[in-house]
Image (spheres, grey):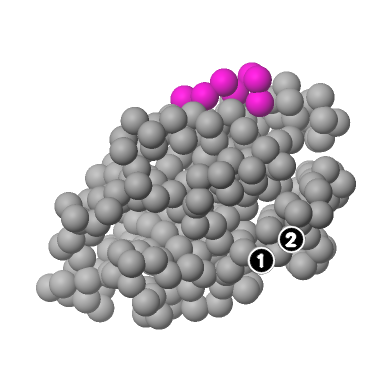
Amino acid sequence: MKYGILGDVHANLSALRAVLERFDREGVEHIISVGDVVGYGAAPAECVALLRERGATVVKGNHDAASTGELEVLYFNPYARAAVAWTRANLGGDEIDWLKALPLVAELEHCCVGHGTFHRPELFDYILSSTDGDPSLDTMERAVCFVGHTHVPLALLRLHEDPLRTSTHFDHEEIDVGQAHRTLINVGSVGQPRDDDPRAAYALFDSELGRVWIQRAAYDIEREAARIRAAGLPEVLADRLSLGV
């Protein structure tokens, strides 16, 4: 099975379309989203519609939960809070219901997917290091699992010959998951990368080959920035797209 894994989309329609075009060219058979379909960007309804049309497996991110009123925004920064309020006002009831119904964790035949962690998915914690990732690696139901949330690509591996030791790989382009006892991969962000590379980040996973590839796709950043400004969202949310921060 060939899977396409979307990092946090964050209502960035141009970036999502660019990655979906890549998936079509690569012959992706099933699409997975690590959550945060909405938030920050100005096309939440359009992004929800695309993922629903594609029959994607989608889990709930913290911005998805906040935008439906399920999560308190007290700890969000002012720009994120403003985006949540705007998103709530610009989603229809059917879209809100769809976001509410998303699971925190999804199990597929060859992998699993969550937003922040697997041991405490409801807290939306960040995995920034092997120390952060070890509890999730300990509780994963599949040998290969994907997360997002940090917007920075990261791979944590426990090899068969040393399954108690976790090795860390940042922005590793090709990952041999067939040689690993457990692999936890953050695929970065489609709609708002924060690793100094403004291109959309995603992953391809071939379960038969036992390989994962972290990939980037260029998209029309200025078009999406203009959409954000036209919506009246905070200017910084448009400016940061071209910086990858």
Is the residue 122 above or below the residue 61 in the image?
A: below
**x and y percent of residue 87 in the render?**
79, 46
Q: Residue furthest toward the left?
A: 161
Q: CA distance from mark 1 to mark 2?
A: 6 Å
Label 2: few (<14), some (14–19) or many (≥20) C-alpha neighbours in 10 Å: few
Residue that appears at 38% across and 57% down? 185
Is the residue 47 above or below the residue 157 in the image?
A: above
Numbered tag placed on residue 97 in the rendering: 2
Residue that appears at 50% across and 64% down? 114
Residue that appears at 59% across and 28% down? 14
Tell me if 130 is positioned left or right of 18 in this view.
left
In the picture of the structure, the residue carrying the numbered disc 1 is: 101
Q: Amino acid at mark 1?
A: Ala
In magenta stretch: residue 221: yes
Magenta residues span 218-224
**x and y percent of residue 195 in the render?**
49, 40
Q: Amino acid at mark 2?
A: Asp
Residue that appears at 74% across and 60% down? 97
Is the residue 113 above or below the residue 53 in the image?
A: below
Residue closer to the observer: 6 or 81: 6
Tell me if 210 is positioned left or right of 25 in this view.
left
The reply to whether residue 82 is visible in this rendering is no
Tell me if 101 is positioned left or right of 30 in this view.
right
Badge 2 marks a residue whose secondary structure is: helix
Badge 1 marks a residue whose secondary structure is: helix
Badges 1 and 2: C-beta atoms under 8 Å apart? yes
Residue closer to the observer: 56 or 176: 56
The reply to whether residue 8 is visible in this rendering is yes
**x and y percent of residue 182 in the render?**
28, 69
